[in-house]
Amino acid sequence: MIRVENITKSYGSGAGQNKVLRGISLTVRDGDYAVILGASGSGKSTFLNIVSGLERPDSGTVTYDGTDITKLTDRQLTAFRRDNIGFIFQQYYLLPNMSVEKNVRMGADLAGNKDYRSIIEAVGLGDKLKSLPSELSGGEQQRVSVARALAKKPKILFLDEPTGALDEHTGRQLLDYIGKLCEKLGFTVVMITHNQNIAEMANTVIRINSGTVTEITENAAPKSAYEIGW
């Protein structure tokens, strides 16, 4: 379980200070599929970075099963992210001179996972093992980044606008893969998106505006990637 209590974050100082997060508190349950909605500048990306341990808050706590990561040293925090967290961003961040298999194996090696090829198969790229990123479509590159993140066997998968650069067909495919793998492997999903329709796939929908949580709703009947609008 992730418990966030009274998180604040500002950038700059004095008259130029920008208060991005203004005391956010919420809980994400183990195995949850949580979607965070908010307009550009609402603070959702900063919130994701803090909850995932990429940034530190000015005040407040982020607790994972009793461990407050805001009190960890930089070295301890790096180890925590390595052992527990996977990231998927709008940008693919693949190494261009390495094949699909080698890019995914980078994530697998962090967890000592020898079965990473099954993840590549699960995202539909079993026939692209030796291909370089430049030989793949945008959707295929994003699926490589998904496989690399999941090859770490993360407990929590954080996604920052994963469909932002994809067309509808490819975006639906990607969300379908993630949804099915979430069910199969049992990890927690926390995703930020501008696409309100994607919230229909979530168990929990969190709306953020001007650095505060404005609404948290539970979805009793989540839809599949092919049932939502786009």
Image: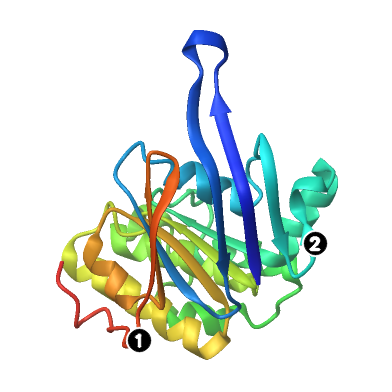
Q: Nearer the viewer, residue 186 or 103?
A: 186
Residue found 44% across the figure and 45% down from its top: 212
Label 1 crowd bin: few (<14), some (14–19), many (20+), radius 10 Å? few
Q: Is residue 30 rendered to the left or right of residue 109?
A: left
| Image quadrant where one finds the C terminus | bottom left
Q: Earlier in the sequence, mark 2 or mark 1?
A: 2
Secondary structure found at label 1: loop
Disc 2 on helix, strand or loop?
Answer: strand
Is residue 124 visible in this depiction of the protein?
no
User: Where 227 falls versus 52 (above or below)?
Assistant: below
Instruction: Give the residue at x 40% y 80%.
Output: 179
Q: Which colour scheme is used?
A: rainbow
The numbered mark at residue 67 is 2
> In the picture, which quadrant includes the N terminus?
bottom right
- Tell me residue 94's x, y (percent): 49, 52
Q: Marks 2 and 1, Cα distance to the nearest angstrom? A: 30 Å
